[in-house]
Amino acid sequence: MKKQLQELLEKGIIRPSSSPWGCPAIFMEKKDHSLRICVDYRPLNAVTVKNKYPLPRIDILLINLSIDLRLGYHQIKIRAEDIPKTAFSTRYGLYEYTVISFGLTNAPAYFIYLMNSIFFEELDVFVIIFIDDILIFSKMEGEHAEHLRIVLQRLRDHRLYAKFSKCEFWLREISFLGHVLSEKGIPIDPSKMQEVLDWDQPQNVTEVKSFLGLAGYYRRFIENFSKIAKAMTKLQKKNFEWSPECEEAFQTLKTRLTTAPILAQLNITKGFDVYCDACGTGFGCVLMQEGRVISYASRQLKHHEEHYPTHDLELAAVVHALKIWRHYLMGNPCNIYTDHKSLKYIFTQSKLNMRQRRWLELIKDYQLEVHYHLGKANVVADALSRKARCHCLQVSSGICTLCDDLWKLNISMIEHGSLATLKITYNLVDQIKESQKKYKGMAKIRSKLRKSKAKCFQLDDQGVLWFGKRLVIPKDFELRKLILDESHNSQFAIHLGSNKMYHDLKQRFCWTPMKREIARYVSECDVCQRVKAEHLKPAGTL
């Protein structure tokens, strides 16, 4: 510290102080593993009027030569009356900065404002700036030489100095903001991946947030990101308890990050294809151009969204994609692909609820067409729980049991038909068994069962919990929706009414409140609302 203080004093960056202000000085490790003096300015930042000048979005900047300004903040002087506020204490005395210091809340905003002002004419033409990093890109070598000359002359005119050891010239591939930019596409910077591989298991919520922050920065490279990270995300909401699911998510994210695909460089002059999907747990979208993936996006459902009908849920996935990629899609033609056929007619529907009207106003800002894409063909969409939704019910090998099940579902046998032999990996009972293990309420029942205090319940040979002759369904809304879908909306179902559907299901399954959930499900069925006759008395005039 003494050595760095002396160096800063000799350069005029700091001076001895007698200010009433004072913040502690600390060391921070730089990219080259050397140490830099930083000051903990949190008390000062708390009472500072914030500069609202926006910082550029990194994903927009990644649309190449690199120059890094030498101690960029230290090249800007502070007003004389504000210098005492920057005072910091060390064991060698109290000092204050005469130039902008790292840690001041308005330093990034003011510096990017300065750089954008200096390179206003060249910005996004052949220059990209992120604080003190300058990226110069060109198509031809001769053109690149001229661009270099303009940028370096502009820096000289404004007396801004670059650190030569951090400047790179005439490159076809460059590491910029944690990514590698090249003509082949945009992969993750390999130098960042060793840090991921060496990451130890998080021991508390802070460490979980730190890891998810790193992983989230690269989420555009990871398909199914929100589904994979769901178990770790939940740790931020409740008591910290590292479970096998969290360990699996942790290791999967590390693997996905270190084997992430190379995303294509987009061409802003060409159109885009957006594949959207929604399910009971989240949204998933893929942005593509000419058959190559530009970016993945996904998120989990918010609590109120879990109660959306299917039509609104699929439309919400489209709106999510339009919002997150607005900077790409606005003003460019794009095709939206969804596996919900009725969305094709969203622009011509005469009856829309208030939520749909708000979304339609947003959608009309874009130059887009909506196309129907079969769910089984929509393999690129990041459907967060598609695996769970597509698990088929197991066909038992016993013909008597099969006939009995078909009779209960009101399905008749065809005399001259034949039954194919299918190999199905997952079945409904397996899903119920796994779901019962996850929910605490089931554990309490099992505990009482071992103590002979729950006589109505029983465990079968596979460890599945039954209530009499009915399977116990835990508070797993995704599983319940699967059962309701298979009973009401599958290829073998006939869209039963709520009473008949409840009468059939209660003979095989047990959960609360079953009747209420079935009634709501049937009332929200699009096919039933369109086809079935209305038995209520027509409403009177207003």
Image (cartoon, rainbow, N blue to C red):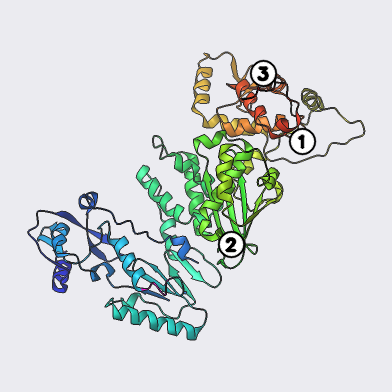
- Judging depth in this view, the residue of 43 and 260 nearest the camera is 43
User: Which of the two marks, 2 or 1, is nearer to us in this view?
Assistant: 2
| Residue identified by numbered label 3 | 469
Mark 3 vs mark 2, CA separation in Å: 58 Å
Image position of 277 (left or right of 234): right
SS of the residue under disc 3: loop
- Residue 36 in picture, x, y percent from top left: 24, 64
Label number found at residue 332: 2
| Residue identified by numbered label 1 | 491
**Dot 1 amino acid type:** Gln
Instruction: Tell me the residue at 58%/57% (across/down).
Output: 287
Magenta-drawn segment = 119-123
Q: Who comes first in sequence, dot 3 or dot 1? A: 3
The rendered magenta stretch, by its main secondary structure, is classed as loop
- Judging depth in this view, the residue of 220 and 417 nearest the camera is 220
Is 179 placed above or below 152 here?
Answer: above
Q: Residue furthest front?
A: 542
SS of the residue under disc 2: loop
Instruction: Tell me the residue at 53%/56% (across/down).
Output: 325
SS of the residue under disc 1: loop
User: Which of the two marks, 3 or 1, is nearer to us in this view?
Assistant: 1
Instruction: Tell me the residue at 70%/37% (across/down).
Output: 392
Q: Is residue 445 visible?
A: yes
